[in-house]
């Protein structure tokens, strides 16, 4: 199960490095990361296979606090023009509202929605 963890960090040099180091030192692989924020604070999203190890690593190092976490859908994609458009069209035609999209390692796209079951069903049709 892929989990998107949202971590609020100070928007300053080294914030990402500290979070990434805490996770990697605990053996947690960050399959993706994206950070959004202007001003003093930013939201860092990290993609991990299991939240527990990342949560523990961040807690014991006092590097950051996870403010939200949720299951997301990760889809393998071909690295070509239009791949994201094709997936977005499938999701839209199913009437699913996306509230999170980012790219992960190894040509994968991460999708989040309040309707996770509907999102999974829509994207499962991609494989057929």
Image: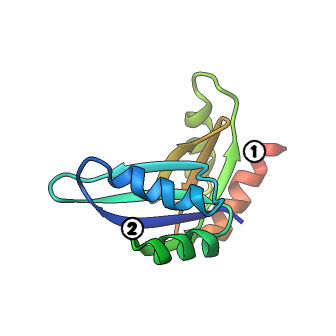
Please, is residue 81 above or below residue 23 in the view? Answer: above
x and y percent of residue 23 in the render? 55, 60
Looking at the picture, the colour scheme in use is rainbow
Mark 2 vs mark 1: in front = 2
User: Position of 83 compared to 102: left or right?
Assistant: right
x and y percent of residue 128 in the render? 84, 44
Disc 1 element = helix
Q: Nearer the viewer, residue 35 or 77?
A: 35
User: Position of 101 compared to 10: left or right?
Assistant: right
Q: What number of labels is visible? A: 2
Which quadrant of the view contains residue 76?
top right
Disc 2 element = loop
User: Position of 66 compared to 4: left or right?
Assistant: left
Q: Residue furthest left?
A: 39
Q: Nearer the viewer, residue 61 or 93?
A: 61
- Mark drawn on residue 63: 2
x and y percent of residue 90 in the render? 63, 46
Please, is residue 3 above or below residue 62 in the view? Answer: above
Dot placed on the residue nearer the N-terminal end, 2 or 1 = 2
Instruction: Tell me what residue is drawn at x 66 percent, y 52 percent.
Output: 74
- Mark drawn on residue 126: 1
């Amino acid at each position: 199960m892929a989990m998107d963890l949202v971590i609020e960090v100070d928007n300053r040099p080294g914030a990402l490095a500290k979070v990434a180091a805490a996770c990697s030192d605990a053996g947690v692989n960050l399959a993706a990361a994206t950070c959004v924020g202007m001003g003093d604070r930013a939201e860092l999203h990290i993609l991990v296979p299991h939240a527990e190890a990342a949560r523990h690593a961040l807690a014991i190092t006092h590097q950051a606090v996870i403010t939200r976490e949720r299951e997301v859908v990760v889809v393998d994609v071909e690295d070509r023009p239009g791949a994201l458009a094709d997936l977005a069209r499938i999701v839209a035609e199913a009437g699913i509202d996306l509230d999170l999209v980012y790219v992960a390692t190894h040509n994968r796209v991460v999708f989040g929605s309040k309707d996770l079951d509907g999102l999974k069903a829509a994207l499962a049709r991609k494989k057929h």
